[in-house]
Image (spheres, grey):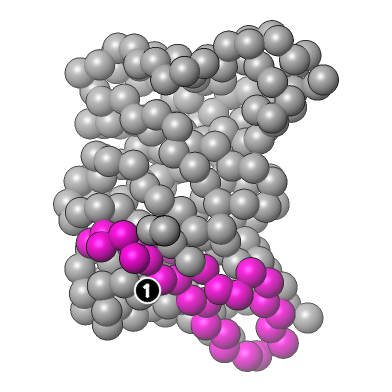
Amino acid sequence: SQQGEEDPQALSIQEGENATMNCSYKTSINNLQWYRQNSGRGLVHLILIRSNEREKHSGRLRVTLDTSKKSSSLLITASRAADTASYFCATPPSGSARQLTFGSGTQLTVLP
Amino acid sequence: DGGITQSPKYLFRKEGQNVTLSCEQNLNHDAMYWYRQDPGQGLRLIYYSQIVNDFQKGDIAEGYSVSREKKESFPLTVTSAQKNPTAFYLCASNPRQGVVDTEAFFGQGTRLTVV
């Protein structure tokens, strides 16, 4: 039961550019989370945004949430080669809020 | 240092064998999860546990089994009934039971290969 879907599947940009990834989900949520995964490693939490919030910032990261469109976006500003990773959105699915379901991710490559 | 430890990092299984993946956390978290990740794919939930001696099936539980005898430990057994077990397995935890409204913490994963 996949809840979130990221778009695009892959994104390649030059260092210093901004990267935007989108996530769409199917049912109502109480929060949406973004995670990062370096190749062959575990996931690291980036930001959690609650359903009553519209925007949240953390350093070079900005997350927006539009509950009317059931979508979220993650913006990474002034990207660096070290930002190269896969990025996933995750939500507790409707009817089973005690677990997190993940999308298939966006593979971001930042070229030096 | 607090965290989640998965072992081993790499595991090889012969066809027909059962293997057990270890997951230990010293974060005093109530909830623990097992996910499977195939190449280029997202995470799929295998099992999760909210408290000791209780666990629920996720989306792809067939061919897997778990136990939660201690709060800090949530081992996953990949049985011979799992026909395609080659994958990357991730263990995660969350501070409390109930609705997941805080960040989850992940281990570094175990890569299982059938030989």
Host chain of mark 1 = B
Task: Please say whether residue A73 is visible from this viewpoint.
Answer: no
Instruction: From the top left corner, tell me how far across and down residue B83 is, in percent.
Output: 63, 76
Dot 1 falls on a residue whose secondary structure is loop
Instruction: From the top left corner, tell me how far across and down residue A5 is, in percent.
Output: 50, 32
Task: Please say whether residue B66 is visible from this viewpoint.
Answer: yes
Instruction: From the top left corner, tell me how far across and down residue B102 is, in percent.
Output: 27, 41
What residue do we see at 72% from left, 87% from top? B14
Instruction: From the top left corner, tell me how far across and down residue B9 is, in percent.
Output: 64, 69
Q: Identify the residue under disc 1.
A: B74
- In the image, residue A66 sits, relative to residue A27, either above or below, namely above
Dot 1 amino acid type: Phe
- In the image, residue A25 sits, relative to residue B44, either above or below, namely above
Residue A79 located within the stretch drawn in magenta: no
What residue do we see at 66% from left, 35% from top? A85
Is residue A10 toward the left or the right of residue B102 in the image? Answer: right
What residue do we see at 39% from left, 29% from top? A47
- What segment is highlighted magenta in the picture? B6-34
Of the pair A111 and A20, the residue shown nearer to us: A111
